[in-house]
Each structure stands twice: as C-alpha cells, then as structure tokens.
Image (cartoon, grey):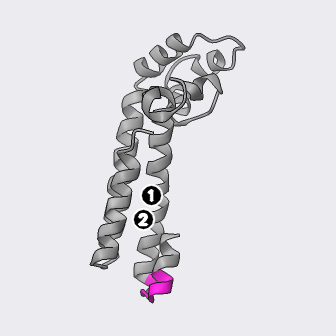
Amino acid sequence: STELGAIVAGADVDARACLAKFGQRLGMAFQVVDDYLGIWGDPKHTGKSAASDLFARKKSYPVIYASQNSDNFAAYYQQPNIDIDHTIDILETSGAKQKTINQAEKYTSLALESLAQSGLEGEAVLALEELLSQLVQRQS
C-alpha cells in the first residue's frame, strides 16, 4: 500500500522500491507487536483476556522462537491441556519475550531505514513515520 501511494505520487522506481520495503517492514513490526500483545498485553488495553493467543494455540512469533530454542516446547505446546502460566514461564525462560521485543525494534528500525533511503521528504514522510510509531507503540 505504501508503494501504491508512491506510484500515484509519481515517485521514481527507486523511491517506490524503498516505500515497498518500508510497507513490508512496517507490516512485520506490526505483526510482531501484535504477537507480543497476544501473550503479554494488558487486557484493559487489548480488550481480550491475557495470553489469549496461547489459549487459541496460535503459532505466534514468541511460540515459534521458543519451539526452536527451548527443548521440548513444541511437543509441550501441542498437548491438549497446557498450563498457561507455565507456558508463559517457558516462553520467558527461553528468551522469547525479549526476542519478540528486539525483533519488533529491528523491523521498526529497518522500516525507518527504508523510508530514509527513499530520498523523499515532507509531510507524507512525517505521516508515515508517525504511522509506524503509533502501530508499534500501541497497547492494543
């Protein structure tokens, strides 16, 4: 969608490519933050119960990370009756919580880098920076 805006505005091919990367990286940052909030988000802000993604057995970023970096987590997570508090403990012990935060920050930084490389300036760029900030700093 960010590339489409560049096309409509008549941006050159290089700027369009940078804005396409910006949009992809913004989307990745958004999703990783969403995955974080689905486990550690405050129900008062998210509007859903704590650890709702774990109850739904979603294969979110923290779950995939723990599956790859914690012995037997993948098998444990597939069991029919898991203890949610224990599951959160495993995720945190495996480093999944911090890795999720770090990954969201990485995608945010890469998105900003792509936007800067576009060579574009002005209100539209400021609006895209603000959009990125709002999406990754949200509580819900």
**Residue at 42% in and 20% down:** 92
Mark 2: few/some/many CA within 10 Å (<14, 14-19, 20+): many
Q: Is residue 48 above or below residue 137?
A: above
Secondary structure at badge 2 equals helix
Give the magenta range.
Answer: 6-13
Q: Main secondary structure of the magenta part?
A: helix
**Residue at 61% in and 33% down:** 59
Residue 125 visible in the current orientation: yes
Mark 1: few/some/many CA within 10 Å (<14, 14-19, 20+): many
Q: Is residue 84 left or right of residue 41?
A: right
Residue marked by disc 1: 25
**Residue at 33% in and 54% down:** 133
Amino acid at dot 1 = Arg
Q: Which of the numbered marks, if any, corresponds to residue 138?
A: none
Q: Is residue 100 above or below residue 57?
A: below
Query: How far from the left and from the top, in percent, is residue 91?
Result: 47, 21
Query: How far from the left and from the top, in percent, is residue 20?
Result: 48, 70
Q: Is residue 25 magenta?
A: no
Q: CA distance from mark 1 to mark 2?
A: 5 Å
Q: Is residue 51 above or below residue 38?
A: above
Secondary structure at badge 1 equals helix
Q: Is residue 114 left or right of residue 1?
A: left
Do labels 1 and 2 touch, CB within 8 Å? yes
Quarter location, residue 80: top right
Amino acid at dot 2 = Phe
Residue 41 visible in the current orientation: no
Residue marked by disc 2: 22
